[in-house]
Image (cartoon, helix red, strand yellow):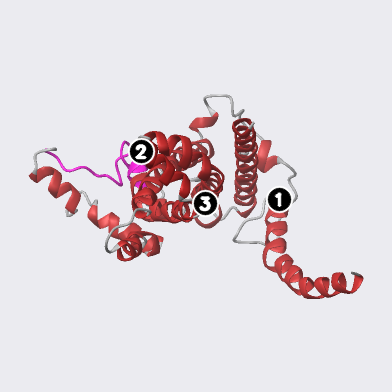
């Protein structure tokens, strides 16, 4: 037993060292910078400022999160945008993905080809799909605007990616188009593992398809479905590229990752930018923990 343990650690040690170098050291350095006033123009000279980047008058959380003023700051707006984007997009992608998976789970001619075609939006790189939709939704030359005008739905073309009233929800729509295949793939994998005999018995008994879905299918796939939602939620909370390309990181759609990028790269404030990056990591971690705890409690209650 000791021999096996020693061999296991021999193989694991190089990987652990590599993980510390690749992930641990940059994370530790970012956390350290968050307690300093480091500027990108002179990284060598900085001063330790403690928690000023977090809780001072000009820090990220200088105002209480329970105050209306906090949600009017750039950081507060970025948190609000990120959670609005994440919650709405994940809910829509889960519902649409489950619906697509249910259809693809049926027997029909050409099913393999359709399954492959459904994955195309997900396979397209995010930057490419964002630029593509940017042109489709263009307020002067875009296909969507032209169709809406031609069919009489609107009289004046809409700036979908520039108008604050539409920009965030346009990003959500594009993200749903791109990521629904991912959720569909995970849901389909769960559906493929379900026993066929209970469905055959339900058909013989004349059970309505909707009742069969609520009473049989959904309870059987709820655990893998919850895992898929958690994965997608964690990915959505760190969104950056889609928003940045589609809306140029405007104030009305800026995400937490976009705020970090703007503070670090555009403004050169590595100290406060690192504080925002560390806060983003903690917010995502706490969100994941709370969601998993809530999901576990709910699943345990249903199983009892």
Q: For the residue carrying disc 3, how many other residues have a C-alpha within 10 Å: few (<14), some (14-19), or many (20+)?
A: few
**Label 2 to label 3: alpha-carbon separation:** 33 Å
Q: Give the range drawn in magenta.
A: 155-171
Q: In this view, does 5 lie above or below 221?
A: below
Q: Nearer the viewer, mark 3 or mark 1?
A: 3
Answer whether residue 197 is magenta in the image: no
103 left or right, relative to 70: left
The residue shown at (45%, 37%) is 84
Earlier along the polypeptide chain: callout 2 or callout 3? 2
Question: Relative to residue 96, is residue 56 depicted above or below?
Answer: above
- Dominant secondary structure of the residues highlighted in magenta in the image: loop
Spot occupied by residue 80 in the image (x, y as percentages of width and height): 49, 36
Q: Name the residue under label 3.
A: 235
Q: Answer left or right for 41 relative to 199.
A: right
Residue 108 screen position, x and y as percent: 29, 58
Q: Which residue is drawn at 11% across and 43% down?
A: 149
The circle drawn on residue 36 is 1
């Amino acid at each position: 037993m000791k021999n096996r343990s020693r061999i296991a650690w021999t193989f694991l040690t190089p990987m652990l060292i590599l993980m510390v170098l690749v992930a641990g050291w940059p994370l530790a350095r970012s956390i350290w910078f968050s307690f300093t006033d480091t500027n990108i123009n002179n990284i060598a000279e900085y001063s330790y400022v403690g928690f000023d980047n977090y809780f001072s008058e000009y820090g990220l959380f200088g105002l209480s999160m329970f105050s209306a003023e906090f949600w009017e700051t750039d950081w507060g707006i970025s948190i609000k945008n990120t959670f609005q984007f994440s919650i709405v997009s994940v809910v829509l992608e889960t519902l649409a993905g489950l619906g697509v998976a249910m259809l693809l789970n049926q027997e029909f001619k050409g099913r393999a080809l359709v399954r492959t075609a459904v994955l195309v939006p997900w396979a397209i790189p995010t930057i490419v799909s964002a630029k593509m939709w940017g042109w489709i939704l263009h307020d002067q030359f875009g296909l969507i605007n032209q169709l809406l005008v031609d069919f009489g739905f609107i009289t004046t073309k809409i700036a979908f990616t520039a108008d604050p009233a539409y920009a965030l929800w346009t990003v959500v729509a594009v993200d749903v188009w791109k990521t629904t295949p991912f959720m569909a793939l995970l849901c389909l994998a769960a559906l493929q593992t379900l026993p066929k005999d209970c469905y055959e018995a339900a058909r013989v008994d004349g059970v309505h398809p909707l009742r069969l879905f609520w009473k049989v299918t959904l309870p059987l796939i709820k655990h893998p479905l919850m895992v898929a939602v958690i994965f997608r939620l964690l990915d959505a909370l760190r969104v950056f590229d889609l928003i940045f390309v589609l809306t140029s990181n405007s104030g009305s759609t800026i995400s937490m990752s976009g705020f970090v990028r703007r503070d670090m790269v555009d403004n050169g404030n590595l100290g406060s930018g690192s504080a925002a990056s560390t806060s983003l990591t903690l917010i995502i971690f706490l969100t994941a923990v709370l969601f998993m705890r809530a999901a576990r409690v709910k699943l345990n209650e249903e199983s009892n």
